[in-house]
């Protein structure tokens, strides 16, 4: 009985059938994670590029509209209209506009204020639309995005809030032109 068992074990050890299946079983999960992470990164890049483009076009309109002072809702609507790939843009986009002194530059806060679906009340942000002439203005938009694959690869490793969304931030500057 023992001799038969030893022969069967030796035969099993020498057999090469099924090696492709073992290799596939080992490498397929890693390749799948890389594929899903690539799709996630592509969508993040597309959404961020569209947000940046929408910000640039909107700020260009503000700069060319000499003397006009667009309000928060108008700017938000323009950005959401132009940022095609951001789902529920009007609910997930938060704008912040601050006046900065270029001669005494202190910068802006590193962490952008964003919406958070897990909170009941929207956070307060500064939006200064009544700046004096020739004032340097910074406009920052923060859009909250749901990952496509939130539990796999890149989607699992993004910094997310309590509702599972991550932030895309775009910043643009302009000078408040005189009337």
Image (spheres, rainbow, N blue to C red):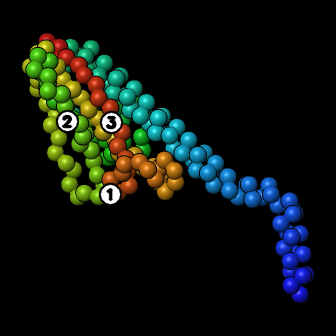
Determine whether, in the image, residue 113 is placed left or right of residue 78: left
What's the CA distance linking mark 3 and mark 1?
Answer: 18 Å
- The residue that label 2 is drawn on is 109
Across and down, in percent, residue 57 comes to: 35, 22
Quarter-of-image position of residue 114: top left
Residue 85 placement, left or right of 14: left
Q: Nearer the viewer, residue 89 or 29?
A: 29
Against 5, residue 18 (above or below) is above
User: Which residue corresponds to the image point at 51% horizontal and 44% vertical from the top-left?
Assistant: 40
The residue positioned 70% from the left and 58% from the top of the image is 25
Say what secondary structure mark 1 lies in.
loop
Toward the bottom, the furthest residue is 1
The answer to whether marks 2 and 1 mark residues whose Cβ atoms lie closer than 8 Å is no
Earlier along the polypeptide chain: callout 2 or callout 3? 2
What whole-number distance in Å separates the C-alpha atoms at marks 2 and 3? 12 Å
Q: Residue at x 35, y 57 (%)?
A: 163
Residue 70 visible in the picture: no
The residue tagged 3 is: 169
Q: Are marks 2 and 3 in contact (CB under 8 Å)?
A: no
- Mark 2–mark 1 distance (CA, rounded to whole Å): 22 Å
Residue corresponding to mark 1: 162
User: How many residues crowd mark 3 within 10 Å: few (<14), some (14–19), many (20+)?
Assistant: many
Query: Does 165 appear above or below 111?
Result: below
The secondary structure type at the circle numbered 3 is: strand
Regarding residue 174, the answer to whether it shows in the image is yes
Question: Which comes sooner in the sequence, label 2 or label 1?
Answer: 2
The quadrant in which residue 103 appears is: top left
Residue 7: horizontal and vertical position, in percent?
A: 90, 75
Tell me what residue is drawn at x 28 percent, y 52 percent.
Answer: 116
What number is the disc on residue 175? none
Quadrant in the picture for the N terminus: bottom right
Q: Secondary structure at mark 2?
A: loop
């Amino acid at each position: 009985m023992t001799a038969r068992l030893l022969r069967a074990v030796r035969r099993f050890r020498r057999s090469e059938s099924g090696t492709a299946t073992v290799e596939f079983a080992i490498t397929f999960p890693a390749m799948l994670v890389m594929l899903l992470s690539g799709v996630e990164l592509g969508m993040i890049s597309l959404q961020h590029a569209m947000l940046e483009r929408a910000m640039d076009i909107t700020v260009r309109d503000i700069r060319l509209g000499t003397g006009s002072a667009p309000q928060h809702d108008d700017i938000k609507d323009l950005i959401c209209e132009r940022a095609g790939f951001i789902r529920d843009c009007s609910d997930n986009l938060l704008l912040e506009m601050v006046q900065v002194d270029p001669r005494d530059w202190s910068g802006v806060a590193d962490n952008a204020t964003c919406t958070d679906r897990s909170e009941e009340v929207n956070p307060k942000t500064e939006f200064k639309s009544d700046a004096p002439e020739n004032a340097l203005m910074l406009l920052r938009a923060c859009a909250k995005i749901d990952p496509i694959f939130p539990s796999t690869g890149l989607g699992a490793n993004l910094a997310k809030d309590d509702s599972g969304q991550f932030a895309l931030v775009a910043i643009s500057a302009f000078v408040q032109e005189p009337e």
